[in-house]
Amino acid sequence: MSAPPVSAGGSLRARAFPPNWPLRIGALLFVAYVIYAAGIVDIRWERFVQGLGNGARFLGRMFPPNLAHDKMQLLAQGMLESLQIAIIATGAGVLLALPIGLCAARNLMPLPVTVLARGLIALCRTFHPVIVAILFVKAVGFGALAGILALIVATIGFIAKLIAEAIEEMSMKPIEALRAAGSPFLSVVTMGVVPQVLPRFIGFAAYQLDSNLRNSALVGLVGGGGIGATLFTAFQRFDYDFVLTIIIAIILAVMAGEILSAFMRRVYQDEAPSGEVKIGAAGPVWHRFTTAERSMRLAFWGLAALALGWSVQTIEVIPEFLYDAPAQTVDLFARMWPIDWAYFPKTVQQALIETLHTATLGTILAILLATPVALMCARNITSSAWVNTLGRFILVATRSVHTLVWALFFVAVFGPGALAGVLAVAVHSIGFTGKFLAEAIEEAKPGPIEALRAAGAPWGSVLLKGFWPQVKPAFLAVSLFRWDINVRESAVLGLVGAGGLGVALQAAMDNLYWDQVGLVLAVIFAVVVVTEIVTATLRAKVI
């Protein structure tokens, strides 16, 4: 063995770890970017402090919540319509996503079919539901129908992508056996594919119902019906105590939706069901599921069918608007062509820069805010049940209220501009980032943590040396994925005055300059594609 290195004075080197200069330089560049981006989007400390005073007065006008009888009637009507929109959009979107996801699976379909299906999925996922809702409002008019169609498009993009990935990850042995036996394609799908992907499909559908319940409040802000229209009207009338009532109702509805979706996943994603043995004419027969489990599954399908039928029968939709929807859509896109490229350097370029800075600064702030909340939620770090419950409530509450609704709130407090957009993106992202970070912390292996604690390491050292090396890959993945989402979110915040491309889009629509609207949509499409490529590349290299 070689002797430990000795310094010029003859003593052992005290520093076990040499300084990481690339990391230090990267940290300096990071701080420099934050200062630069904050200056570009006019985020100043004086403006923030002034907004805190406005926020105190704003919150004072929100309390107590307005529970008047006429307000409760409006709330009930809006929430009922939002629930109907979510149920119909989820049911129709899932049914349409199934064949599209099947066609997108490369292990089942030929290349031309998968390319076409994946292109359709990418198109459905590219534009934010608000932008899709705006286009449908122009095509079929204001009301629930536009919101339903917008959420169907979002559902197709989400469910079809995940179904295709689930099919590609399944075992091919049952498929090959069925093909060798000469089974037709439909039999291969029903007997070989469906049994393998059904549990995951139910989980995807349950999550999408929960997501559509949140987004149904979102599309109403642009005329797509539901509680969002009631919320936006209350903001315009400065009826802030009723705004708080609506927000509380949305949070409670989303929490109920999460409980329902968790129950559905538990019923259908049981990997080791108990089963039962029944005595038949031919002797004992083992059944995979017990009578109670089969009854529960049948009850779920019955309730789902009843809910979908009730929603279709009771929601106020004018079917006549569908008759000329194709003609209106063709006319709308015809007005967008040719695109007014001269509008880019005048307005869109600056709005694009502001959007990217808003998304990046909002993501950074979200990570800073979500990290302590995640530590509160992680049971292997925080043993107090009260602290865990508080942390989980923060996660649910922040992600239950959509970014556009948070933007409305922060615009009222801090005024129009990118500051409201950054804060809206950050607060809404706390729920997503904190949830996945807390799960990653709870999944950390206890061995290194226990060794550090046994050695008497302080709490900070346990986090830095025990948890961080294990959580780092998930942390980077969640941060990159959230930034990708926040770029889409930031592109529409300007519709409520929070800066970015949404301001340019709203101005072009207000003036009926559809060639400029086409330019903004083309820029959003290009930005989303580029950010997906960038995040995929970074995940492959860093994680």
Image: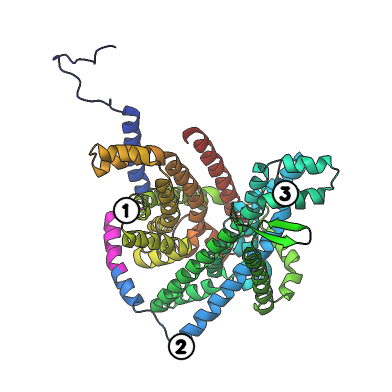
Element type where label 1 sits in the image: loop
Q: What residue is drawn where x is 18% and y is 16%?
A: 7
Q: Position of residue 169 (x, y in %)?
A: 64, 42
Mark 3 and mark 1 residues within 8 Å of each other at the beta carbon: no
Q: Residue at x 36, y 38 (%)?
A: 447
Residue 381 coordinates in the image, percent (x, y): 33, 50
Image quadrant occupied by the N terminus = top left
> Residue 249 at x, y = what percent?
46, 74
Specify the quadrant of the image occupied by residue 4: top left
Residue range highlighted in magenta = 42-55
User: Disc 1 residue type?
Assistant: Thr
What residue is shown with label 3?
A: 193
Q: Mark 2 = which residue?
A: 69
Q: Say whether residue 30 is visible.
A: no
Q: Earlier in the sequence, mark 3 or mark 1?
A: 3
Which class describes the residues within 10 Å of circle 2: few (<14), some (14-19), or many (20+)? few
Q: Amino acid at mark 3?
A: Val
464 and 20: which one is in front?
A: 464
